[in-house]
Image (cartoon, rainbow, N blue to C red):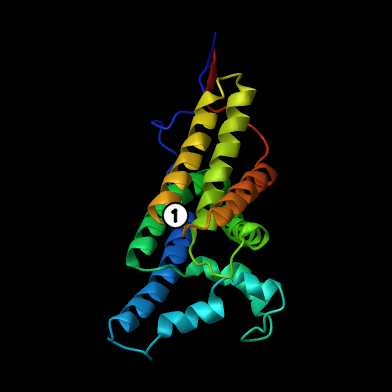
Amino acid sequence: MTDARPPRADRPFPKLGPWARTMILGLIAISTLIELGLWGSDLGLWGPPRLRQTVYEWAGFWPGLLHGWTPNFPGQPVAMFLTYGFLHGGPVHLLVNMVTLWSLGGAVAARIKARGLLALYLGSVLGGAAGYGLLAQTVQPMVGASGGLFGLAGGLLAWAYIDRYSLRARLWPVARVALLLVAMNVAMYWALDGQLAWQTHLGGFLTGWILAILLDPMPRRTLVRRG
């Protein structure tokens, strides 16, 4: 007899390996140390005045640099596709993103290990920047890890789709999560009075979906039991 049950969220992922844990904690540490430095400067505890603004000017993602603006240093129009992902708009922004990174990163690493996680995350950071550069109709800079985070979410949904399709299970749970992500972006866009880089979220999500399929295209059938 065959018991073909699709993956469920209440079934725990395999134990996170030491390399994957180190990778996730390392990514969290980089963003946290940068934000602590900027926050301390904001409070006047150390550093030059306007340190946050200066760092944003040098490492944030500026759409204008793709359209003829003069960069602060050679290579900035390329480097900003990655550096923006380690900057945040304050402690709350950082906290929300890092909690999300720990949660989604563990799930992704359980499937494609530490190196796969790093490739998916950084690739999605780049894809998020590309989405913002192509779609944003503004000269405002963009910072935050959400391009990479939406890439992790896109990857997990891609695998859920592959696994469920191979098991001939209902695809509605995958569509429901996708709709919830859209609704969340609409709500955040309204709550932040339009100051939400949804273009980055979209670019990261699509990049993560594609990279996940390239990194692990085979369906997982570990929950199929035969007797």
Residue drawn at (66%, 46%), measured in percent from left and top?
Answer: 215
Residue identified by numbered label 1: 101
Residue drawn at (33%, 67%), measured in percent from left and top?
Answer: 91
Q: Quadrant of the N terminus?
A: top right
- The residue lying toward the viewer, choosing from 7 and 84, is 84
The image quadrant that residue 159 belongs to is top right
Classify residue 7 as left or right of residue 199.
left
Picture coordinates of residue 69 (x, y %)? 67, 80
Residue drawn at (37%, 79%), measured in percent from left and top?
Answer: 37
- The answer to whether residue 220 is visible is no
Residue drawn at (61%, 86%), measured in percent from left and top?
Answer: 72
- The answer to whether residue 38 is visible is yes
Q: Quadrant of the C terminus?
A: top right
**Relative vertical location of residue 109 with respect to residue 225 in this rendering, above or below:** below
Amino acid type, residue under disc 1 in the picture: Leu
The residue at the far bottom in this view is 48
The residue at the far top in this view is 1
Picture coordinates of residue 24 (x, y %)? 46, 59
Element assignment for label 1: helix
